[in-house]
Amino acid sequence: MYSALLLMALMLLAPLSGCIGGTPEEETIDADATLTIDGLPATEAAVRLGEWHDLLLVGEGLRLSAPADDVLLFVNGSMDLDSSVPVDGDRQAIRLLTTPYTEAVELTIYDQNGRKTVFELPVENGTPIVNGQEWFEKMDYITCDPVVDGRPSAECGGYNDRWMGAGNPAYERGAAYFQGHFESLGYRTYMLRVTDHLNPSQPESLNVIAWKDGRDDSCVQGMGGHMDIAPPGGPPGGGTHEGAYDNTAGTVSMMLYARVLAELEVECDTFLALWSSEEEGLRGSNAFANNDCGYCLPQDKELRFYINMDMMGISWPAYKPTGEPYPYHAWSGPDIDPDEQDVAITSILDHVHRNVLKAPMDLRIDGTYGAGCDQHWDDHANLVMDVHEDTFGRSDHVTFRDLGAQTIFHLGAYDDDYDAYHSPSDTLENMIDVVGGQDKLEESIEFVMWAALLEFLFADQTPEIRNVG
């Protein structure tokens, strides 16, 4: 009889323990009474992966926390590095963002007495704030040919043949289109035209520079990629018409970043740039860094970091026709001592790939890749995720690295791993073919775009990212 009564009592008590927070003594915070997500009570909401969600936490002394590797929390337009946000006053507006690769979203509400409520939100597929499908649609619009494809101008921009120099009208037309994109998002946008040889009809460089003011006007930081493509006859493949991979892909990535960053606050004055004349010796980025104009790189501000996007979309998780994964390269610098970590941005580079994106950092192939980094190639020749400090040059990050900025250079397959490099075959159609389909290409570009975006967000909020000079 006693056993039966005890069993009944336990059964009646079981529902009171709830599914939130563990033991009854800990359940002192009502999540639905203190937190709304997209206007819904907290436990009724779901998280769409890669999308923004608006949270409101109500109650003095409360704090909302989440695992920082899986959930990013933003307050007043900036990311909170710890993903732990206290209420300022009696309520706090918070924005929540996950990556497309987040598997679980767990939130914890604390009160000022240390009591807490823990709950997990269901996750659903979303439309990420930077995504491969939108990138592909913009690539298709820029690289199509209205005459050959028979598409009306509203569906086909046809911004090809962007060879720098000789007053190329196709380049000028493309630059004007890109400038309009940044201006439409509210950036202060400029054309930086530099003529070093005294012939105004043949500029050495014509860049598009978009500026966003930061909270601290004593420092500067930026992202960029070159919008010019290899001219006819250029080595090693004879030049290109679309330059889809090198570097329309990176150009479109910058266009998508501009839309995201337009809604956020940044710590330092920030430039988003499309460089010219990278194929002729980094003339465009050097013109920006070393000329004295109202929208050039300020000489009286600390240059903190720069992230470079060049040759995007043919890298892990895409696979070669041989069945091997394409290499994925992301190099930080300056790498002054190959035996030591020299810059704090390397920790961000590793954290983003290893912990946030959960990339297979130790994945190797049975063999070696055709080309790679400078300092550590013996250790990385067969490593798919080639992510580390290195001195590798050959793109616009070198301009800023030489000025003491901490830099990250993103690069996919190149040279021996992509035989259309600098050739007429560097087309969007060829990119689709070599990775095995449009969906594979979109998957590949989406991963690297998220990596660089996260690196920027972390570096923006990390005081240790300082000019090494």
Image (tube, helix red, strand yellow):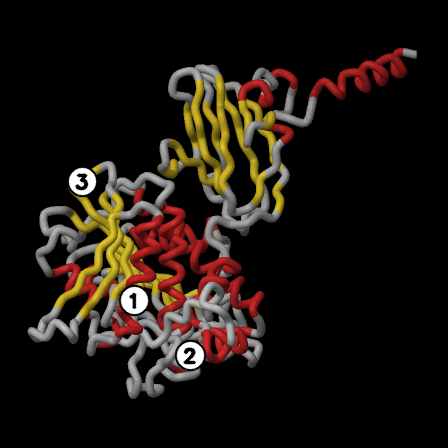
Q: Is residue 69 left or right of residue 267?
A: right
Separation of disc 2 and disc 1 at Cα?
16 Å
Q: Earlier in the sequence, mark 3 or mark 1?
A: 3
Looking at the rendered structure, which numbered label has been put on residue 217? 3
* Pointer 1 residue: 226
Q: Secondary structure at mark 2?
A: loop
Spot occupied by residue 457 in the image (x, y as percentages of width and height): 36, 46
Q: In the figure, residue 241 lies in which quadrant?
A: bottom left
Marks 1 and 3: in contact by CB < 8 Å? no
Amino acid type indicated by mark 1: His
Looking at the rendered structure, which numbered label has been put on residue 426? 2
The mark lying in front, picked from 3 and 2, is: 2
- Which residue is rendered at x = 35% and y = 44% of the image? 262
Looking at the rendered structure, which numbered label has been put on residue 332? none
Foreground: 49 or 138?
138
Q: Secondary structure at mark 3?
A: strand
Amino acid type indicated by mark 3: Asp
Q: Is residue 372 left or right of residue 70?
A: left
Q: Residue furthest left?
A: 198
Q: Is residue 400 left or right of residue 381?
A: left
User: Is the residue 50 above or below the residue 284 in the image?
Assistant: above
Crowding near the residue tagged with mark 3, few <14, some 14–19, many ≥20 C-alpha atoms within 10 Å: few
Crowding near the residue tagged with mark 2, few <14, some 14–19, many ≥20 C-alpha atoms within 10 Å: many
Q: Earlier in the sequence, mark 3 or mark 2?
A: 3
Q: Earlier in the sequence, mark 2 or mark 1?
A: 1
Question: In the rendered image, which quarter contains the N terminus?
Answer: top right
Separation of disc 3 and disc 2 at Cα?
41 Å
Q: Is residue 182 left or right of residue 249?
A: left
Q: Secondary structure at mark 1?
A: strand
Spot occupied by residue 351 in the image (x, y as percentages of width and height): 41, 51
Residue 238 at least partly seen: yes
- Which residue is rendered at x = 63% and y = 28% of the image? 43
